[in-house]
Image (cartoon, rainbow, N blue to C red):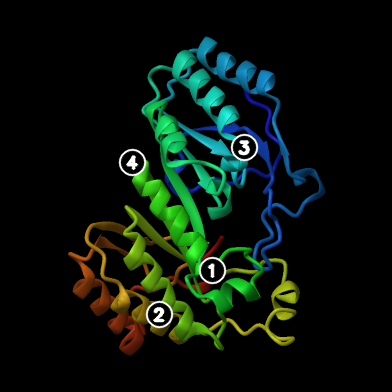
Amino acid sequence: MLNYIEPVFRPPSEWKSLILQVTNGCSWNRCSFCDMYTAPQKRFRAQKLDKIAEEIKAVAYNGASVSRVFLADGDAMSLPFNRLEEICLLIKEQLPQVTRISSYCLPRNLKGKSVEQLARLKELGLSLLYIGCESGDDEVLKRIEKGETYESSLEALLKIKAAGLKSSVMILNGLGGSELSHQHAVNSARLMNEAQPEFLSTLVVTLPLGTERMDKQFDGHFQLPDQLGLFKEMHTLLDGLALNKTVFRSDHASNYLVLKGILGRDKAKLLAQVEQAINQPTQSGLRQEWQRGL
């Protein structure tokens, strides 16, 4: 059994994966909307390579059935290329049955990594990076203290594609508040159109510890769009998307309306679902508040 520094977070699609905690916490950890890694025990640090090797060998020795590995915590890709290469080599040697290695990744994590280095990691099994772009709007990104811009996000996504890896991008519905809702949706769609990610998901921003940190960035009061406002923002986003073949999911527990499809094949169908939620909410199978969660 692996000893984790709790809490540990992972994408919903990694529920069957071996979670390998190669870092603890998040190297940035300044985003005003995010409380995931604020606990004292989650202060960022890289795990020692010998401990990672011990854990991988222990999993192999116990004969666990592992086909996928997720490198935790918040942005394992902040590790230097040489360390990531060593970790992927260990997985490949000790767990040869693994078919996919994945990780969260901040766009800034890739600034010092070349396309050739990323291609080498892909050769060793790293094939999917989850990119929390959150928004494609520079004003929203500045307000939430993301430390990224439209251009820095696009640069990272294009580098991932050039290396042959897949990207799964997350956009946060409601992140611009009522004030910046429209431009948040418009520019997020523009970013996705330029990047053409393989996967795109949307979540509704949730602030379980309160709005105090966001309030400071929104003139003293952050106002999350109401349900109707969230649906209108989603409609603007979908309407602006011109994607060729992207798996789209808006089925996280935070969402009122579950949406699934391939963009652009299913764009008209998805827009119709959102329009029904706007005009006939009681007939749209929306989640009740008690059914929603992080």
- The answer for how far apart the CA atoms under marks 2 and 4 are is 28 Å
Question: What SS does tag 1 mark?
Answer: helix
Q: Position of residue 102 (x, y in %)?
A: 46, 38
Between the C-alphas of marks 1 and 3, the distance is 39 Å
Q: Which residue is mark 2?
A: 186
> Where does label 4 land, which residue?
164
Q: Quadrant of the C terminus?
A: bottom right
Residue 58: x and y in percent read: 59, 15
Q: Nearer the viewer, residue 190 or 52?
A: 190
Residue at image position (55%, 25%) is: 87
Q: Which residue is mark 3?
A: 79
The residues tagged by marks 2 and 3 sit, at their Cα atoms, a distance apart of: 33 Å
Q: What is the number of callouts on the image? A: 4
Amino acid type shown at disc 1: Trp
* Residue 196 spot, x, y in % from top left: 31, 59
**What residue is shown with label 1?**
290
Q: Name the element at disc 4.
A: loop
User: Which tag is nearer the camera, tag 2 or tag 4?
Assistant: 4
Q: Earlier in the sequence, mark 2 or mark 3?
A: 3
